[in-house]
């Protein structure tokens, strides 16, 4: 899935993160992009680069959803299945399931 926040930096799309102080962090598309401007904020080997919003030509957020019986529901990966959340109800679906086929949906 490609859910997440993204920004266009110097003509290339990058995944971005925004911290609690609204600082934007740019994540590299490959290890070869990592230079001395990238930092490992949490000492986990995950590098990001602080950038200002003015350095990004676009920012957007992608979220997967499905429509089921007229409701829009979020879709999240769960191992080899997908899970749909709507309120407090979680519905598990096989990845290959046609959402128009309600017979194969199991509420857990």
Image (cartoon, rainbow, N blue to C red):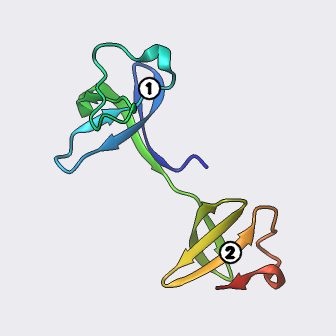
The residue furthest front is 43
Q: Give the residue displayed 63% in from the left and 70% down from the top.
A: 83
| Relative horizontal placement of residue 71, taking residue 13 as reference (left or right) | right
Tell me: residue 47, above or below residue 20: above
The residue furthest left is 21
- The residue where tag 1 is placed is 28
Towards the viewer: 82 or 80: 80
The residues tagged by marks 1 and 2 sit, at their Cα atoms, a distance apart of: 33 Å
Q: Give the residue displayed 53% in from the left and 50% down from the top.
A: 3
Q: Secondary structure at mark 1?
A: loop
Q: Position of residue 30 (x, y in %)?
A: 51, 22
Towards the viewer: 79 or 77: 79
Q: Give the residue displayed 40% in from the left and 17% down from the top.
A: 34
Q: Position of residue 86 (x, y in %)?
A: 53, 79
| Quadrant of the frame with the C terminus | bottom right
Task: Compare marks 1 and 2 and give the one earlier in the sequence.
Answer: 1
| Relative horizontal placement of residue 104, taking residue 27 as reference (left or right) | right
Q: Which mark is residue 92?
A: 2
Q: Secondary structure at mark 2?
A: strand
Q: Give the residue displayed 48% in from the left and 83% down from the top.
A: 87
Counting other residues with Cα less than 10 Å from the Cα at mark 2, is it few (<14), some (14-19), or many (20 or more)? Answer: some
Q: Position of residue 33 (x, y in %)?
A: 44, 16
Tell me: residue 46, above or below residue 5: above
Towards the viewer: 10 or 79: 79
Tell me: residue 21, above or below residue 56: below
Q: Position of residue 103 (x, y in %)?
A: 83, 84
């Amino acid at each position: 899935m490609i859910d997440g926040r993204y920004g266009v930096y110097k003509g290339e799309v990058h995944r971005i993160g925004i911290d609690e102080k609204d600082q934007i962090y740019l994540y590299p598309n490959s290890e070869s992009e990592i230079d001395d401007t990238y930092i490992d904020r949490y000492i986990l080997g995950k590098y990001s680069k602080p950038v200002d919003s003015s350095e990004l030509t676009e920012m957007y957020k992608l979220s997967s959803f499905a429509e089921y019986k007229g409701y829009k529901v979020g879709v999240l990966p769960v191992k080899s299945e997908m899970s749909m959340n709507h309120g407090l109800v979680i519905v598990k679906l096989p990845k290959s399931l046609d959402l128009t086929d309600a017979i194969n949906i199991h509420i857990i």
